[in-house]
Image (cartoon, helix red, strand yellow):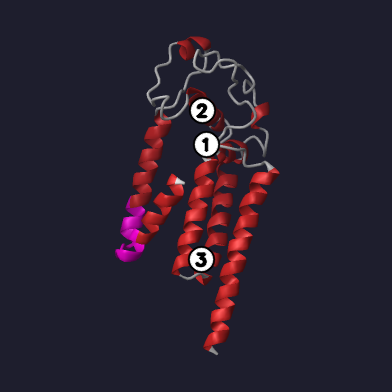
C-alpha cells in the first residue's frame, strides 16, 4: 500500500511540475545508487563463522534476518551466472540453497527455502540480466499502451495498482507461482477493459 501510494504521489507531482529528461536521468541514477548501497549492506560471506559473527548493518526490525541472508546469498549466486541465470523456478535447487543458515536469528530456515522472497532478485537469479530486462520492458510497454488510452483518474489507478502489486512482490511470493501471475494479468486485464470501454464510449459521444 505504501509503495502504491508513493508511486501515485510521484505521478501527481510529475504532472504538476515540468520535469525534463535530465531530471528523469538524475532520478534513475539516484535510485541506482540507493539500491547499490542497500545491496552493499547485505551479507556477503556464508561460511558458518561469518554467519555466527555477522553484524546486521540493516536493522532486523526494518528487514528480517532471514530475508537479508536470502537476498545476500541469492545475489552472490547471481554473480556466477549473470547473463542467463539458473533457469526459471530453479533457485531452491541451487547448490547450498537448501542448507540451513545456522544463525541464532533464523532458526532452521534455509538460504533459499523455496524462492528468494523478492520477485526482482528471483528473476535476476533465475533468468539473468537478459531475462530480467526483457520482462521489465514487456511490463512497461504493456502498461504504457493501456496508460495512453486512460484518462487522468484511470492513469492514477493504474500507477497505484502497479506500485501496490510489485511493491508486495518485493518481499513476498514467488513470481513463478501461477496464481500470483494470474492475479496480476487478470486484474490488469480488468483495468484495461474498463479503460478501453470508457475510451470507446467517449469517442462515440464525440461523434
- Please tell me whether residue 60 belongs to the stretch shown in magenta: no
Labels 2 and 3: the sequence-earlier one: 2
Q: Which quadrant is the C terminus positioned in? A: bottom right
Q: Assign the magenta stretch its main secondary structure.
A: helix
Image marks 3 and 1: residues in contact by CB distance under 8 Å:
no
The residue that disc 3 covers is: 147
Residue drawn at point x = 62 percent, y = 67 percent: 193
> Which x, y percent locates residue 26?
32, 51
Residue drawn at point x = 52 percent, y = 47 percent: 166
In the image, residue 85 sits, relative to residue 138, either above or below, namely above
Secondary-structure class at tag 2: helix
Image marks 2 and 1: residues in contact by CB distance under 8 Å:
yes
Label 1 neighbourhood size at 10 Å, few (<14), some (14-19), many (20+)?
some
> Which x, y percent locates residue 108?
60, 16
Residue drawn at point x = 48 percent, y = 23 percent: 65
Secondary-structure class at tag 1: loop
The residue that disc 1 covers is: 171
Give how far apart the Cα atoms at labels 2 and 3 are. Answer: 34 Å
Pick the residue in front: 41 or 185.
Answer: 185
Labels 2 and 1: the sequence-earlier one: 2
45 relative position to 197: left or right: left
Residue drawn at point x = 57 percent, y = 61 percent: 142
18 relative position to 3: left or right: left
Pick the residue in front: 205 or 63.
Answer: 205
The residue that disc 2 covers is: 67
Secondary-structure class at tag 3: helix
Question: Quarter of the image holding residue 38?
Answer: top left
Amino acid at each position: 500500500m505504501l509503495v502504491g501510494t508513493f508511486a501515485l504521489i510521484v505521478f501527481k507531482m510529475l504532472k504538476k511540475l515540468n520535469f525534463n529528461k535530465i531530471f528523469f536521468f538524475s532520478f534513475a541514477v539516484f535510485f541506482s545508487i540507493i539500491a547499490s548501497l542497500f545491496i552493499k549492506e547485505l551479507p556477503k560471506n556464508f561460511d558458518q563463522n561469518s554467519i555466527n559473527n555477522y553484524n546486521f548493518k540493516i536493522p532486523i526490525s526494518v528487514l528480517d534476518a532471514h530475508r537479508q541472508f536470502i537476498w545476500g546469498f541469492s545475489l552472490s549466486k547471481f554473480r556466477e551466472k549473470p547473463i542467463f541465470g539458473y533457469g526459471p523456478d530453479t533457485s531452491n535447487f541451487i547448490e547450498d540453497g537448501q542448507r540451513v543458515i545456522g544463525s541464532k536469528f533464523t532458526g532452521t530456515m534455509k538460504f533459499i527455502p523455496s524462492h528468494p522472497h523478492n520477485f526482482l532478485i528471483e528473476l535476476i537469479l533465475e533468468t539473468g540480466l537478459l531475462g530480467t530486462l526483457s520482462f521489465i520492458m514487456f511490463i512497461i510497454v504493456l502498461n504504457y499502451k493501456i496508460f495512453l488510452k486512460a484518462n487522468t483518474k484511470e492513469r492514477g489507478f493504474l500507477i497505484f495498482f502497479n506500485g501496490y502489486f510489485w511493491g508486495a512482490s518485493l518481499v513476498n511470493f514467488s513470481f513463478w507461482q501461477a496464481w500470483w501471475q494470474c492475479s496480476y494479468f487478470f486484474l490488469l486485464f480488468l483495468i484495461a477493459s474498463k479503460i478501453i470501454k470508457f475510451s470507446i464510449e467517449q469517442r462515440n459521444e464525440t461523434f
